Every structure is written in C-alpha cells, then in structure tokens.
C-alpha cells in the first residue's frame, strides 16, 4: 500500500476512535434519550461494517495469467511468425506477417542479431494487436 494511503488510513482510524470516545461520553450524559441511543447503535454498527469491509478490500490481489508463445525465425526470408494459427486467427496471422515484413524492411540485420529481443518484441506486438483486434471485433458485433 502507498505511504500516503497508509497515513490517511491511520489518521482516519484515529479520528474514528476519537469520535467513538466522544460519542460514548455524550451518550453517558444523556441516558434518558432513546433517539440518541438508537443513533449511537446505528453509527456503531456502520463503523463495524466499515472496518470489516476495509479488512477485506485492502488485501493484495494475487491473480496471474500464464501465456506461452512460440515463434520461429526464418533468416532466409527474413521472417518471424507462429506456425500454429487456427482458422479463427487469420486476422492475427496477417497482422503478425505484416509486422514481420515491415520490421525486416526497417531493420534487416536484426534477424542475425539478438533473436531473443526480436522474439520478445514480436510477442508483445502480437498480444497487443490480438487484444485490440478482439476489442474491435466485439465493438463491431454490437
């Protein structure tokens, strides 16, 4: 959690405790009033629910996804692409091949250089292009 959020949480907690102490003193001086006792009970219940909700909401989220990608570099063409495209991924194939050919035209020596960086770059491009393509297709379907 960020330092400013931690400070805000502690200051807010101290204010709630101080308000609760003041409220208990106020109720103890006005024991004859049913409305004040009822309002104090409602406020105490709301504060308890707030504390319980904060405990659950301020826990870290540990969700992770694993994506595997396998690309083949053809230095003779030069080209980098996946070899397993299903029929539903024809748009992805054309995007990957277009990116590969444009990259080969702009940086022809890169296919003989650092191939790990080349593969990582095309994987990132492919995932982003696929994601934006599925968003675009979903928007067109609506």
Image (cartoon, rainbow, N blue to C red):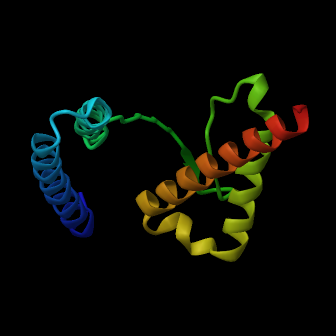
Classify 11 as above or below 98.
Answer: below
Q: Nearer the viewer, residue 20 or 115?
A: 20
> Does the rendering let one see residue 96?
yes
Quadrant (top left, top right, bottom left, bottom right) of the C terminus: top right
Quadrant (top left, top right, bottom left, bottom right) of the N terminus: bottom left
Place residue 18 in its image quadrant. Answer: bottom left
Q: Image point 50% across, 38% down: which residue? A: 70
Q: Which of 79 and 17 is in front in this view?
A: 17
Give coordinates of residue 104: x percent, y percent.
67, 67
Give coordinates of residue 42: x percent, y percent.
31, 31
Classify 3 as above or below 51.
Answer: below
Is 43 positioned to the left or the right of 68 in the image? Answer: left
Classify 69 as above or below 20.
Answer: above
Q: Which of 80 and 91 is in front in this view?
A: 91
Give the total number of marks visible in the rendering: 0
Give coordinates of residue 34: x percent, y percent.
28, 29
Place residue 6 in its image quadrant. Answer: bottom left
Give coordinates of residue 121: x percent, y percent.
53, 60
Is 94 positioned to the left or the right of 43 in the image? Answer: right
Q: Residue reaching furthest top?
A: 87
> Does the rendering let one see residue 93?
no
Classify 117 as above or below 83.
Answer: below
Q: Image point 81% across, 44% down: which residue? A: 136
Q: Residue reaching furthest front?
A: 32
Place residue 108 in its image quadrant. Answer: bottom right
Q: Nearer the viewer, residue 90 or 84?
A: 90
């Amino acid at each position: 959690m960020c330092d400013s959020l931690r400070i805000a949480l502690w200051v807010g907690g101290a204010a709630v405790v101080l308000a609760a102490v003041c409220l208990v003193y106020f109720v103890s001086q006005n024991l004859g009033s049913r409305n004040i006792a009822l309002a104090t009970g409602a406020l105490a219940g709301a504060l308890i629910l707030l504390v319980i909700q904060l405990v659950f909401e301020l826990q870290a989220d540990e969700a992770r996804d694993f994506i595997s990608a396998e690309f083949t570099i053809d230095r003779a063409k030069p080209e980098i692409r996946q070899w397993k495209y299903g029929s539903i991924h024809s748009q992805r194939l054309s995007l990957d091949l277009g990116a590969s050919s444009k990259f080969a035209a702009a940086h022809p020596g890169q296919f003989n250089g650092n191939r790990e960086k080349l593969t990582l770059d095309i994987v990132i491009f492919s995932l982003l292009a696929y994601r934006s393509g599925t968003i675009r297709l979903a928007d067109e379907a609506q």
